[in-house]
Amino acid sequence: MKLNKSKLLVFTTIFLVLLIGCFTFHVSAFDKKATLPDEFTQEYIDLSDRVVTVRTLGTGYGVILNTEVSPFRYEIREGVFGMEGSGFVRDLPFHKFIITNDHVISPSRVTIPISKNASWDTKIIYIKNKSIFIVGCTSAIEGNILYTDPGSDIAVLFIDKNSPFRDTDISFTFSWWMGVRGEYAIESPDVLSDGDAVGVIVRKRDENGNKTSWYEMRIGKVVSTGVKLPGVVDVSALTWFQPMDFTVDLTIYPGDSGSPVVMWLRGKPFIIGVARAVAWCGTTGERFAYATRLDFVVHFLQGYGNTNK
């Protein structure tokens, strides 16, 4: 039986419509309105065993200018470094992890004492020793690096499987992999769109900007699915950003890097990335924050965490 051109065109059109429909269902767009979980409507929320402080301490060497000897005397000296950010817990059958930013655990500067009351902050050229601590409100343990990638600015830390940190017993589920679950698959970065609702889980700040013991979810919108800089574009700043970064209007403070970023799909929240940076323009007052997607490590950790090795 031969099909004429008109019938063939009809069958082809129907097939393409069905194909596009299936694909559209698979990558459903994120919600434009946030559905705040019940916990975050309360004034005092303790998530210290789920969303943690990541503290990196150690010593290293840097170069200083010793003008006491000569105006041109450069010396290599030992100093100290200390950094603090955030992270969140992933508890899988055989392993327990902390997901955070690479820049939270990878020092770039060292403070070198040059006199009793003065010090010199300079670029680090060699790390002598480094310790990474996972800190909650009631406990602190040491973490070990499993995976780190300066390119995506993502780091994953091993922690003791028997530690008190956990990711269960919370209204929205940390245990499903950032939405990679059947009809909720969100593997493509193109699914994000401007105006999507977004939230970040962070420690509350007091009137002086210091962290408190309580947590909150700050709500905002996706400003751009890529990188948008506030005010006048500084081309040099773009070299710091990565293809998986997206721009949001959330309020992010120093120390919030590594906090989980949440989006909603059909009213259900999923962790989609981590808070990474903030930029503002002193002239216009415009301020944006940036998050990076976790697509780089989702499948790796899903396989590794469910393997007894």
Image (tube, rainbow, N blue to C red):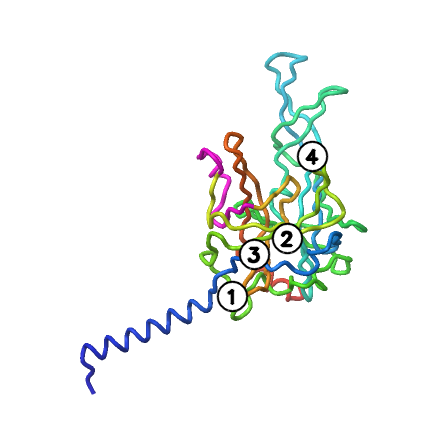
The residue under label 2 is 99
Amino acid type indicated by mark 1:
Ala
Q: Is mark 4 on a helix, strand or loop?
A: strand
For residue 81, which numbered disc appears in the image?
4
Q: Is mark 3 on a helix, strand or loop?
A: strand
Dot 1, how many residues are within 10 Å of its Cα: few (below 14), some (14-19), or many (20+)?
some
CA distance for labels 3 and 2 = 12 Å
CA distance for labels 4 and 1 = 41 Å
Callout 4 touching callout 1 (CB < 8 Å): no
Pick whichever of labels 2 and 4 is earlier in the sequence: 4
Residue 90 drawn above or below residue 129:
below
Tell which residue pokes out farthest to the right in this image. Answer: 138
In the depicted view, which residue is nearer to us: 98 or 113? 98
Pick whichever of labels 4 and 3 is earlier in the sequence: 4
Callout 4 touching callout 3 (CB < 8 Å): no
Amino acid type indicated by mark 3:
Ile
Amino acid type indicated by mark 2:
Ile
> Along the horizontal axis of the image, is 131 left or right of 218?
right
- Camera-near label (2 vs 4) is 2
In the depicted view, which residue is nearer to us: 220 or 144? 220
For residue 162, which numbered disc appears in the image?
none
Pick whichever of labels 3 and 1 is earlier in the sequence: 1
Pick whichever of labels 3 and 2 is earlier in the sequence: 2
CA distance for labels 2 and 4 = 21 Å
The residue under label 1 is 185
Q: What stretch is highlighted in magenta?
A: 230-249
Horizontal and vertical percent for residue 292?
Answer: 54, 49
- Camera-near label (2 vs 1) is 1
CA distance for labels 3 and 1 = 11 Å
The residue under label 3 is 272
Dot 2, how many residues are within 10 Å of its Cα: few (below 14), some (14-19), or many (20+)?
many
Horizontal and vertical percent for residue 248?
Answer: 53, 47
